[in-house]
Amino acid sequence: MTAATSALPLHGLLVVDLGQVYNGPYAGLLLALAGAQVIKVEPPGGELLRKRAERIPGQRYPFATLNANKQGVTLNLKTDRGRELLLDLAARADVLIENFRPGVLDRLGVGWQKLRETQPKLIFASSSGYGSTGPRRNHPAMDITVQAASGVMSITGWPDRPPVKAGPAIADFLGGIHLYAAILTALLEREHSGHGHRVEVAMQDAVIPSLASSLGLYFGSNGHEIPMRTGNRHNGLAEAPYNTYRANDGDLALIGATDAHWQAITRVIGQEQLATDPRFQTASARVAHVDEVDQFITEHAATRARDDLCEELLAAGVPCAPVNDLSEVMSDPHLHHRGMLQPLQHPHFGQITAFASPLRFDDQPPTQLRPSPGLGEHNQQVYAQLLGLDSQEIDQLEREGVI
């Protein structure tokens, strides 16, 4: 541990991370970047995302970034000795993270009831697509299926085309963020009660609040109007302008949330008479004439360079941003200045630009990233230092396929 790490708020916390792919590992990453010691536990062949990274070069980045700043060990939970070792790790841990399908660890004999006997103060943190209760609990879940079931896809895309998923894996990562929050809430409660808890986040549950704007339209019509896809316009059809517009060298997004924004936009596009035109004077009037609003801005944007137009709109106080491609995002000086993006030399994947934690702690610079561990890289260190196994025992476990 470095001096900087020891000053972070979660220093001294021990986390056993059984997470796989995105959801659980992201909660583990946030804990690690807040100072916790996070031990990533994988089967001897590696977790699913590591295997995918070996087959598909494009998947190396997600594995490398989501498992940065963790220690890595292997453990075969399908063996008696492997389950014993997990119980031994849990006995020393503050938190255990898992995002298997509900019931998997119970069937292996290392579920919450067993682990709480071993460590009464353990925070057992679970995440799955639909949760451990309800009629959908046993359904297999991936980000796209959760987006579909939660209603996200029904309001994403264009009204005259089939529904589409959101580009990012929003269900996975919203689930991971909420799992992190649940863990910290349970740790705070443990300070008062002295005992652990099982906490759970369903990805679908975590997505539902993001529908607030569209649900406003639904309930505003007393359930008579089901919001559909609006392209890049406001899902709740409550604001205009609210769209992306094509400049002569790229696209930009802007929103006129207030009358003052609209007045500023009319000045920028050289149509100041529209500020007093009754068709556009109020938000409801602009929504009613949204096609005309968009046409005025589109015609002007087509004559301008994207970044110049953005700068002028921002100077006028209008919320606006260029539609950056991923190359522009990875070189964004703002993100690099904040330390959200950091260069990382990875021993397996080469030079990458990796994302750090969005969380900031007063008087602490962003945690510096360390490469994700190789498969079983810290077996000797973790099993020797935490569990007191000698090198001969560890070698024997490896030969027997336990680690």
Image (cartoon, grey):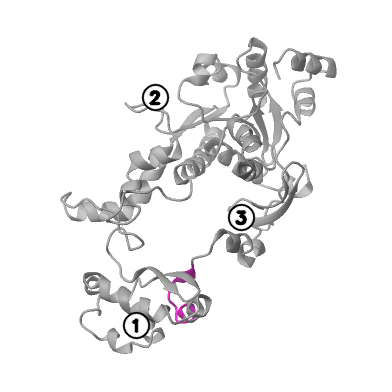
Examine the image and state in which quarter residue 88 appears: top right
Q: Residue at x 42, y 50 (%)?
A: 166
- Disc 1 designates what residue? 263
Whole-percent x, y for residue 383 in the image: 75, 23
Secondary structure type for disc 2: loop
Q: Residue 272: name its quadrant.
A: bottom left
Quadrant position of the C terminus in the picture: top right
Label disc, if present, on residue 360 of the rendered structure: 3
Mark 3 → mark 1, Cα distance in angstroms? 36 Å
Which residue occupies the foreground of this view, 137 or 164?
A: 164
- Residue type at tag 1: Gln
* The residue stretch that appears in magenta: 313-322
The residue lying at 67 percent from left, 21 percent from top is: 75
Residue 44 to residue 374: above or below: above
Q: What separation in Å lies between label 3 and label 2 (alpha carbons)?
A: 37 Å
Instruction: For mark 1, give the secondary structure.
Output: helix
Q: Give the mark nearest the N terminus, 2 or 1.
A: 2
Q: Residues within 10 Å of mark 3 (few under 14, many from 20)?
A: some
Q: Position of residue 90 (x, y in %)?
A: 63, 23
Say which residue label 2 marks.
138
**Mark before the other along the chain sequence, 3 or 2:** 2
Answer few, some or many: residues within 10 Å of disc 2's Cα (few below 14, many 20 plus, some between 14 and 19). some
